[in-house]
């Protein structure tokens, strides 16, 4: 199938969902700008891949860094927002600093990045903003007060932004996966069960991103919810 070649910024391209998306885009001949906090993680250079070191948790320096990003890659016409982390526990287990830092990474940094890139994206004939939300954007869950809040906030933001962008060529999509087998669970007290039906694969989410990017420019895919067939949560001892 003939697809239009895009220049796509993928945040969190060093691991899990972001990495799978970056790989699939490269396989299809798109240009990928991949962000991580440590670009030494990108050990296999690809001619269409540009690594960018960016800490999205440090909001203070972010606006200046983001200005540079836009100037460095003027052809950018899509952004996939994958950088994020899971942190779970009852509210009283979080320090004030931890609350601020989770909301900064999972929500505010995504708004900053959007704010920085939107004027240029609006001038393109076609552009896409695709955010990786979560099932936690749809329903609150025990020990998820802050993680769910960050993802609900992202969902509200994308709904309003979609309206705001409807007179331009910018399409806004939110993809809400259930559990995906990635290093996301490495530091957590739980993970998906062992059966293949207990977790999505990062490539499942990547396929959804490709579908959205390749869809007819005059159609908007608002949201996609994806879930493993048989949700089983395993608690670590
Ligand atoms: N896995 C799941 O079950 C699941 C389900 C629903 C939604 N999600 C969402 O999907 C997104 C990706 O998760 P994943 O499963 O792919 O997790 P992952 O494998 O742990 O990857 C997380 C990515 O975020 C980047 N990142 C973390 N902290 C960062 C920071 N301060 N600044 C910049 N980048 C940072 C990491 O890059 P570096 O460490 O290289 O900087 C890494 O590339 C997250 O938003 C997560 O909430 C995950």
Image: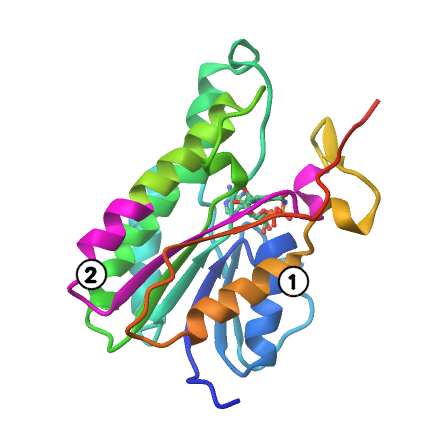
Task: Classify residue 214 as left or right of residue 75.
Answer: right
Labels 1 and 2: the sequence-earlier one: 2
Quarter occupied by the C terminus: top right
Circle 2: is it few (<14), some (14-19), or many (20+) Cα within 10 Å?
Answer: few
| Front-most of residues 200 and 11 | 200
Name the residue tied to disc 1: 203
Is residue 221 one of those drawn in magenta?
no
Task: Classify residue 4 as left or right of residue 28.
Answer: left
Name the residue tied to disc 2: 166
Is residue 169 one of those drawn in magenta?
yes
Q: Is mark 2 within 8 Å of ligand 1?
A: no
Q: Give the CA separation, mark 1 to mark 2.
A: 29 Å
Q: How is the image coloured?
A: rainbow
**Residue 61: quadrant of the picture:** top left
The image shows residue 190 at horizontal and vertical percentages of: 73, 30
Query: As drawn, which residue projects farthest toward the left?
Result: 167
Q: Residue at x 73, y 26 (%)?
A: 189
Q: Residue at x 53, y 39 (%)?
A: 135
Secondary structure of residue under mark 2: loop
Task: Classify residue 95 as left or right of residue 69.
Answer: right
- The residues colored magenta run 158-185
């Amino acid at each position: 199938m003939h697809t239009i070649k895009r220049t796509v910024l993928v945040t969190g391209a060093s691991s899990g969902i972001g990495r799978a998306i970056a790989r699939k885009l490269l396989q299809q001949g798109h240009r990928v700008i991949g962000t991580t906090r440590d670009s030494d993680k990108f050990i296999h250079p690809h001619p269409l891949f540009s690594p960018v070191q960016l800490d999205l948790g440090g909001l203070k320096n972010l606006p200046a860094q983001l200005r540079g990003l836009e100037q460095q890659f003027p052809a950018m016409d899509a952004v996939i927002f994958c950088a994020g982390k899971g942190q779970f526990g009852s509210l009283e287990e979080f320090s004030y600093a931890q609350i601020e830092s989770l909301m900064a990474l999972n929500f505010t940094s995504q708004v900053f990045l959007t704010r920085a890139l939107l004027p240029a994206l609006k001038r393109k004939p076609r552009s896409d903003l695709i955010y990786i939300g979560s099932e936690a954007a749809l329903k609150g869950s025990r020990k998820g007060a802050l993680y769910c809040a960050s993802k609900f906030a992202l969902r509200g933001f994308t709904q309003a932004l979609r309206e705001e962008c409807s007179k331009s060529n910018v399409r806004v999509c939110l993809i809400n996966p259930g559990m995906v087998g990635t290093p996301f669970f490495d530091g957590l007290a739980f993970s998906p069960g062992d059966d293949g039906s207990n977790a999505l694969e990062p490539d499942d989410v990547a396929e959804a991103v490709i579908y959205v990017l390749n869809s007819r420019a005059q159609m908007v895919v608002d949201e996609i919810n994806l879930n493993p067939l048989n949700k089983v949560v395993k608690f670590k001892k």
